[in-house]
Image (tube, rainbow, N blue to C red):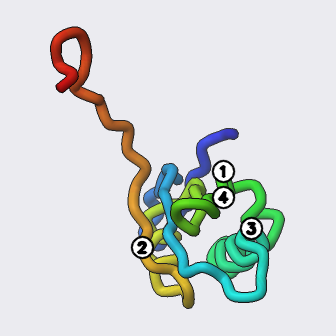
Amino acid sequence: MADREVVVEGGEPSKAEVHIVYTEKPEGDEPEAFHLRTLATVLGSEDAAKESLLYVYKNAATGFSAKLTPEQVAELSNQPGVLQVVPNMKLQLHSGPGRLH
């Protein structure tokens, strides 16, 4: 999937990066359908939402991961049912020989 840039007022492009979006559990709706609708309200279409959506979480947590610009993160954070939007981060585990307790 190619990185996207969105040009905002002032002419500077904003690069889309992967974020994890935590949502309330949708009542009477499939999680993926709810997530696509929520994302489409910010991205402008269901096709754009499908292109941006990377993964749907529905077991331990409810939410999804998607490539979003900072402006899209701000707008998505204000959508009904969205609890939190956080950047995706890779963490280094500090384990190895002699470090397990």
Q: Which of the two residues, 47 or 82, is positioned nearer the viewer here?
A: 82
Q: Position of residue 22 (x, y in %)?
A: 49, 69
Q: Which residue is mark 4?
A: 56
Taking the image as shown, residue 11 lies to the left or right of residue 43, namely left
Mark 4 surroundings within 10 Å by alpha-carbon count, few (fewer than 14), some (14 through 19), many (20 or more)? some
Mark 4 and mark 3 residues within 8 Å of each other at the beta carbon: yes
Mark 2 and mark 1 residues within 8 Å of each other at the beta carbon: no
How many marks are shown on the rendered structure? 4
Mark 1 and mark 4 residues within 8 Å of each other at the beta carbon: no
| Marks 4/2: CA–CA distance | 15 Å
Q: Residue at x 51, y 50 (%)?
A: 18
- SS state under label 2: strand
Q: Which residue is mark 3?
A: 32
Q: Which residue is mark 2?
A: 84
- SS state under label 4: strand
Q: Position of residue 27 (x, y in %)?
A: 69, 88
**Marked residue nearer the N-terminal end (4 or 2):** 4
**Marked residue nearer the N-terminal end (2 or 3):** 3
Outermost residue, top side: 97
